[in-house]
Image: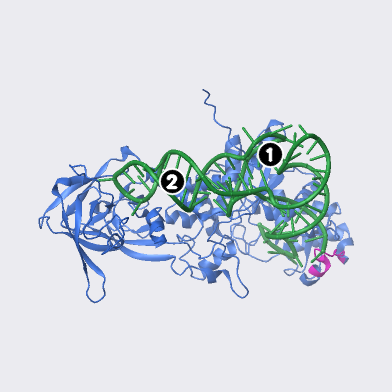
Chain colours: A blue, B green
Amino acid sequence: MTDEKPEEVLDFIREIVADDLRTGKHAGIVTRFPPEPNGYLHIGHAKAICLDFGVAQETGGRCHLRLDDTNPAKENEEYVESIKHDIQWLGFDWGENLYFASDYFEQMYEYACELIRNGLAYVCDLSVEDFKEYRGVPTRPGKDSPCRCRSVEENLELFRCMREGDFEDGQYVVRAKIDMASPNIHMRDPAIYRIKRIHHYRHGDKWCIYPTYDFAHCLEDSIENITHSLCTLEFEVHRPLYDWILDALDVYHPRQIEFARLNLSYTVMSKRKLLELVEGGHVNGWDDPRLPTIAGLRRRGFTPAAIREFCKRVGITKFDGLTDISLLEYCIRDELNKTAPRAMAVLNPVKLVITNYPEGQDEELEGINNPEDPAAGTRVLPFSRELYVEREDVREEAPKKFFRLVPGREVRLRYAYLVTCDEVIKDPVTGEVTEVRCTYDPDTRGGNAPDGRKVRGTIHWVSAAHALDSEMRLYDRLFMTERPDEVKEGEDFKSHLNPDSLETITAKVEPSLRDVDPGTRCQFERKCYAYIDPIDSQPGAPVFNRIVPLRDSWAKIAAKG
RNA sequence: UGCCCGAUGGUGUAACGGUAGCACAGUUGACUCUGGAUCAAUCAGUCUAGGUUCAAAUCCUAGUCGGGCAACCA
């Protein structure tokens, strides 16, 4: 018998990396995660983070966190801090390797000068409209800017003046001199420096010219000695430019490799749309638990491990697909099933009275904290004559396969007693069930029948006198359609918002939860996994966020009729 | 209409010229003091057409479909 582990399957990027190590192309691996600090990170970034930091970790290399802050118009410190926090929370560490693209501005300026000196860049004064006009369209070649033949000296001087602030925004731009007829638009003399009199959140007004992404990014990678520059598919067409600039400057040349970004069903992932949801008040901030932001998932109660596991299961390819949100839900359930202590909470309560239980009597029963983890121990559950049970667990009439409270049937109260339902009392006017009356079998304390009779149904309950009233937020998917991005003429993605994505209720919760620390998770048996909101909870008054419902196979049976 | 990229069950992926496998979702059954979990079974796939080869998901060509590219955004 061999117990060789099946070799972990490598995705195509890890294969390239492994090859480069094997052939000695690189002695060590250096990757980077380069977010622009203009928004909060979301689960799509988590995929990239797991890849960038993961590859480094697995190969004993390092991964830089680099804030790609080359456009001060939308960037700020709040975003920088949130990004750092989210990455750390996810479980990754950049160590000493925290960098800012803006710290390379002086070097980049020099590089641009070098390009100019080598006749590979020029200062152009075409207006934005003319710039577009000259660029042409994908199917038609562009034409050379009249500025293309400006002398090196003049270019250098103009560029210096640009930096000095002698010109208006947009008056001049520096362009790489490549090929206006290239079938790749990005090679048609792309802008590499523009004038923007905008206060930079880190460098104040030191600069009024800023490098563009295409010019800056490859140089950032080069300066940091990145070996593998991993990015998403939309940058594929930029790669020739990435390569051109590094070759033109004859500097260290990392390899850019593109992979598919993550798309998740029933949500949106673009920064612009997330911003719109936040600013439009459709959600309550960047950490709204309905959002796919890292902050939102954290607030919802997801764990870093579950998110990492999800990213691992999604894999890395060049296929731009749509991942089913149920995979994410599976990952968190899978973890929490093993780790989350159980508790009882009645979300939609109806009173149950045990008519043969002595009035005024109390007793303490023992509940198992986690059947999946004996080490989690047990806890005390107060029991009394009047309880709350779930309204949906009560029916006046029901098919045989409904193993719950129906007159004449016996069910088990979890960890308590077997009770027989005698009567379902309804409001004569509304027809709503107001109370369930049962009799209990005193010999079944703990829930076991001494005569060994089988009872199929077990339901959860909370003692009415001991119950804690707690706010609970029931979250559902933010959008009603699988691909909210796909909209009909005249619609926008917001028209697919789910109006019932948040329902706030007051639940009856077992008293053991009263003083549990905010930030902990539990499973409400038969209902859901929940997270004690660390922000809104007060001492003695926990507020619960439903992370995800438990799988509910009864719902499927019931739905089929 | 130009260029780049992609295509394997419903979904996400593996197979690196030699038996199409895994996971999620679905379905069925077993078990169960959570209609949870677990276990078992099951459904279901190589975009199309040519070519190369003893042998093609894999290599080649063409087509089809999908994605990306025309910010002085990243």
Residue tagged 2: A334
Name, please, the residue furthest toward the top: A1
Vertical arrangement, residue A229 with respect to residue A129, above or below: above
Residue A118 in picture, x, y percent from top left: 85, 51
Q: Amino acid at mark 1?
A: Ile
Is disc 2 surrounded by few (<14), some (14 to 19) or many (20+) residues within 10 Å?
A: few
Identify the residue at image location x=25%, y=64%.
A396
SS type, badge 2 = helix
Tag 2, which chain?
Answer: A
Residue A436 in sight from this viewpoint: yes
Examine the rendering and report whether any part of residue A552 can be seen.
no
Magenta span: A132-145
Question: Image height check: is A141 above or below A452?
Answer: below
Give the dominant element type of the magenta stretch: helix, strand or loop: loop
Residue at image point 43% right, 46% down: A334
| Residue A540 horizontal side relative to residue A160, left or right | left
Can residue A172 be found in the magenta stretch?
no
Determine which residue is flagged by label 1. Answer: A16
